[in-house]
Amino acid sequence: DAKTTQPTSMDCAEGRAANLPCNHSTISGNEYVYWYRQIHSQGPQYIIHGLKNNETNEMASLIITEDRKSSTLILPHATLRDTAVYYCIVRAGGGADGLTFGKGTHLIIQP
Amino acid sequence: NAGVTQTPKFQVLKTGQSMTLQCAQDMNHEYMSWYRQDPGMGLRLIHYSVGAGITDQGEVPNGYNVSRSTTEDFPLRLLSAAPSQTSVYFCASSYLQGAGGYGYTFGSGTRLTVV
């Protein structure tokens, strides 16, 4: 699976959009970009994933650059409950070898 | 629909004791897996299963056994607990990762301390 690079930490004001970047310059054509988050002491929570088109669901939007070498997760109206560690993971659509979690980005939503 | 249920939530073991961490899912997911998370670190894969009767090792399998007799259950056994196994354990399940990709559903974790 391709390696990802994320900032260690970010702050965002409550009510504003939180934009979390991820670099994955070695991504292969069959690899998806997945985002998970882990709120303190809880199990990771799946947020969204995409291949090359932008994706949106009830939690967030995922913007993938045209060359697929980077992406941005957008939480449109951040709340205090969005404070968590956010993981960007790149992996192929098939396979059963699990997820490789890096250090992620610690997003802190400020009141 | 309860999702992924892990029991117990907390456990303290003495070195050398054995125990089984339970994981059950009610989503008819073929794929189930176990991760451990040590303080300040990301999750690491211990064992996984792609269906009943089929299991395989992940990144850190030593000291752990698994079996998959039903689609719903995937217990993790520690045969002789060691302090190095003190960690938070998460179970996760999903549909098999076909071409479209699927997100994993994680349980709430079991916090294990070995003294």
Image (spheres, coloured by chain):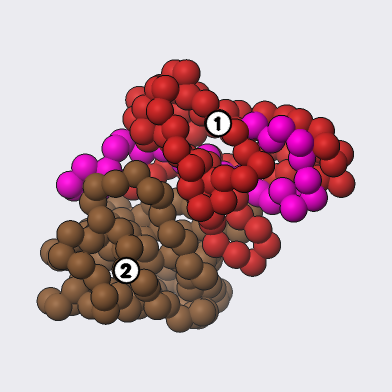
Is B22 drawn above or below residue B59 in the view shown? above
**Front residue (pair A9, B62):** B62
Q: Secondary structure at mark 1?
A: strand
Q: Residue at x 34, y 44 (%)?
A: A96
> What residue would you read off at disc 2?
A2
Q: Position of residue B80 (x, y in %)?
A: 76, 36
- Quadrant of residue A87 within the rendered picture: bottom left
Which chain corresponds to the colour brown? A
Q: Position of residue B5 (x, y in %)?
A: 54, 31
Colour of chain B in the image: red
In the figure, is residue A6 to the left or right of A91?
Answer: right
Three-letter amino acid code of the residue under disc 2:
Ala
Magenta residues, as a range? B77-101
- Residue B97 is covered by the magenta coloring: yes
Q: Residues within 10 Å of mark 2 (few under 14, many from 20)?
A: some
In the figure, is residue A107 to the left or right of A61?
Answer: right
| The N terminus of chain B - image quarter | top left
> What residue would you read off at disc 1?
B66
Q: Residue at x 71, y 32 (%)?
A: B79
Q: CA distance from mark 2 to mark 1?
A: 28 Å
- Residue B103 is covered by the magenta coloring: no
Q: Position of residue B66 (x, y in %)?
A: 55, 31
